[in-house]
Image (spheres, helix red, strand yellow):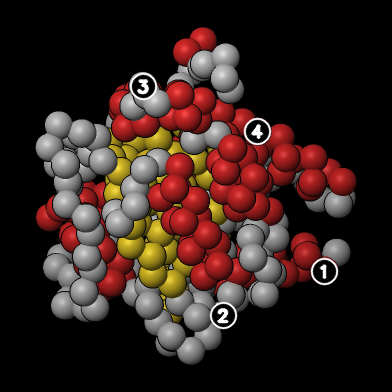
Amino acid sequence: MLRSIVVWLVGLFLAAVPVQESFGQTARRTDPMRLEPQRAGQTDVYILSFGLWGPQSVFESEAKGAARILEQQLGAKGRSIVRFNTKRWAGATPETILAAAEAAGRTLDPAEDIVVLVLTSHGAPEGIGLVAGRETRLVTPGDVRALLERTRAQHRVVIVSACYSGVFARELADAQTLVITAAAADKPSFGCRDGATWTYFGDAFFNKALRGDARLDSAFERARGLVTQREMREGFDPSNPQMAGGSQVLERLMVACGPSPVRQACRCGPPSARSAAC
């Protein structure tokens, strides 16, 4: 009951936040954002991970943990930017988020590389919340589309951990954009408790499923089952996580993993290609 009241109050708060214009035309100069250079002839993965809701530390923790696991599993060491808001620090503002996207855009090969964007926060049917110090705004699918364009990447992955985040799958998914969300467009998700390490979806997808399987699609299927089991066990209406689009992205991620050595084949290859050593 308490959890339902909290979800309702957050939704009411976000509903009162005016939808502002899309992120500004140019990013202001912020802290340096250094990324390892693109390697010609290889598919490199660049990760942008943002914890947007400053008043609760779970979103900082999830943004950090998601980037760390994605970097390890997708071979993206040195190619990630993580920013987050806390009760005392505004590190994921519209300006810094834009700067991160533009840093990736200056570094990657648009046709060859992949950008993975992770957003974790509270959500509403129209988008997700950003609370950075005194700045409060709603980040809409249109904002995220503009952000992806700043990266210049033709192949993108968007992972949104928030209530009602299925709206991003509905608006953004296509063959070149894989969208994974913690909930359907009309469902809340759970586990956003101050002091927690992960939300329910973040724990299932990043911390459990993705640690053992670098294929985003199969990791998602396992995570969806784990989340649903936990929610039903604890008496919650299932959040119904979503995955849509991305057929070309998944093919390119296979290239990024590479066919060898055996360890990579075990982690990244399709079931028919996995070595008996797995």
Reading the chain from its start, which is encountered first: label 4 or label 3?
4
Given residues 173 and 78, the one toward you in this image is 78
Residue pictured at 57% horizontal, 43% vertical = 211
Relative to residue 120, is residue 204 drawn left or right? right
Identify residue for label 2: 55
Identify residue for label 1: 2
| Other-residue count near label 4 (Cα within 10 Å), few / some / many at <14 / 14–19 / ≥20 | some
| Other-residue count near label 2 (Cα within 10 Å), few / some / many at <14 / 14–19 / ≥20 | some
- Counting every numbered tag in the picture gives 4
Disc 4 to disc 2, C-alpha distance: 30 Å
* Cβ atoms at labels 1 and 4 below 8 Å apart: no
* Whole-percent x, y for residue 237 in the image: 78, 46
Reading the chain from its start, which is encountered first: label 2 or label 3?
2
> Identity of the amino acid at label 1?
Leu
Q: Secondary structure at mark 1?
A: helix
Identify residue for label 4: 222
* Mark drawn on residue 259: 3
